[in-house]
Amino acid sequence: MIPWIEPLASQRADLAILEAEMARETAVTPKELVHARGTMRLYRYLPQTPDVYRVPLLIVMSLVSKPYIFDLTPGQSFVEHLVRAGFEVYLVDWGTPRAEHRGLKVDDYVADLLPDCIAHVKEHSGVDEVTLLGYCLGGIFTVLYAAMEPKGPLKNLLQLATPVNGEGMALQRQLLTSQGLDPDLIVDTLGNVPSSMIEGAFQMLRPLQKASGQVSLLNNANDREFVKAHLRIVRWGADALPFPGEAFRQLAHDFVVGNKIVGGEFEVRGRKVDLRDIRVPVLHVLAEHDHVVPYAASRDLVPLVRSRDKEEWVIKGGHVSLVAGVGAVTRTWPRIVDWLAPRSV
Amino acid sequence: MSKPTASDPLKAWRDWFVENERAWSESLTRVMNTEPVSRAVGQEINAALHSQQMLTQGMAAPLAMMNLPTREDVVALGERVGRLEDAVARVEAALVQMRSAPAGNPTGKPARTRKPPARGAAR
């Protein structure tokens, strides 16, 4: 018998138990399905307080990441934190696009699917105002919607790491403008951009992060909670979703290369959208070391909008630190609740 | 930084790696951000796409001869399952809606009367 076989087998069994444990603990805040259309799902988290703030909150996720990052595990769940603070929380999950969804454009998300969700939130809650929370690419959808519907039902706009300046997406822009990477070829060949390419693109933005994470895991192998917390984030990062082809093409050409959002030239259904039309209260929370959405790509949002009530916070940490981790639980989320509560009555 | 222990002499190296990873990653990203490297990376991806397309086309006939499904067949099956999931979700949402109280009388829903805590109040 080879001496190291037995401990290795035991470690594999431990890891399997850990994986099962993590799966049981992920996304467990009680919720109900309010609306389904295509792959899109609109969930409502069940209130856990005797009374709630008047204005419901709708979380809009990115297209390429799964929304369980907002409900990672009890005690480390942004949704749970909001629900316990007395908010009625809805979440839109765009789902996994199939080949038939390759034609979905940003226009469809901003001018059709998101308004459809908002209409269902209004109908379900019985309130004619909604606060939108957009994270990353989902944030692009919420700012475009807010600018298109200045007289709409929007009460507040809460943005997390939202890129608006294509020039700030330096590496992606360089890849697309150096006559190397051809987004049209990708979409025409593959339809939707596969999740493996999305994951590869994230890794390219910080090439040694994965290796560093594995080394960190080795250093803390005996700390079960550290291992679980680490694996949760790693699992989420590896769980990227395919990018609907036409939406990818549109964002590559019109946002990253054309930089049309800050210039007020980005078109949705033939209409130019100008972020200067946003007048509702805006909070934009950014991360200091965000390698996915660098500060140069996101810093223009707050100066651009014409809201009288607007703030930008830059917190320590990276892209995920906004929605997960100790700093989020103890500092960022309580601050967000303090900002949102008086604006939700 | 942790000191190396007799049982784990590599820990110091690992700590050093973790501490410096961000700076090294940024250096690598700066290299990738240069014109020749980004062009080469992009062209590599384009070439891989062409190869994949040719392989997919080339494999269709041999797989059919062996009575094996192609990737497209498997994807089509996945799409059918996806559409079934969508249909089940629509039924679930309709059931949830039916179970809910009629609009205007949201029985079981909490009152929307919550006020923010007064400034300085204990959290």
Image: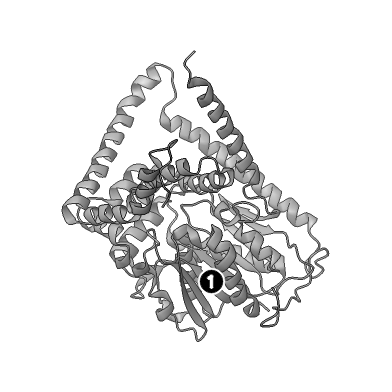
Compared with A235, A51 (above or below) is: below
Q: Residues within 10 Å of mark 1 (few under 14, many from 20)?
A: many
Q: Left or right: where does residue A150 sit relative to residue A20? A: left
Residue A270 in view here = no
Q: Residue at x 38, y 17 (%)?
A: B65
Residue most extreme to the bottom: A308
* A90, A264: nearer the viewer: A90
Q: Toward which corner of the image does residue A92 lie, by quadrant?
A: bottom right
Q: Left or right: where does residue A253 sit relative to residue A218? A: left
Callout 1, which amino acid?
A: Leu
SS for callout 1: strand
Residue most extreme to the front: B6
Coloration mode: one colour
* B9, A345: nearer the viewer: B9
Compared with A55, A62 (above or below) is: above
Q: Residue at x 52, y 59 (%)?
A: A61
Q: Residue at x 25, y 50 (%)?
A: A181
Q: Toward which corner of the image does residue A83 lie, by quadrant?
A: bottom right
* A285, A219: nearer the viewer: A219
Residue A92 in view here = yes
Q: Toward which corner of the image does residue A24 lie, by quadrant?
A: top right
Q: How many marks?
A: 1
Q: Left or right: where does residue B88 sit relative to residue A211? A: right
Residue A336 image point, x, y percent: 58, 71
Quarter of the picture holding the C terminus of chain B: bottom right
- Label 1 lies in what chain? A
Location of mark 1 (residue) = A158
Residue A189 image point, x, y percent: 32, 43
* A278, B29: nearer the viewer: B29
Compared with A31, A221 (above or below) is: above
Q: Left or right: where does residue A13 sit relative to residue A273? A: right
Residue A202 image point, x, y percent: 38, 51
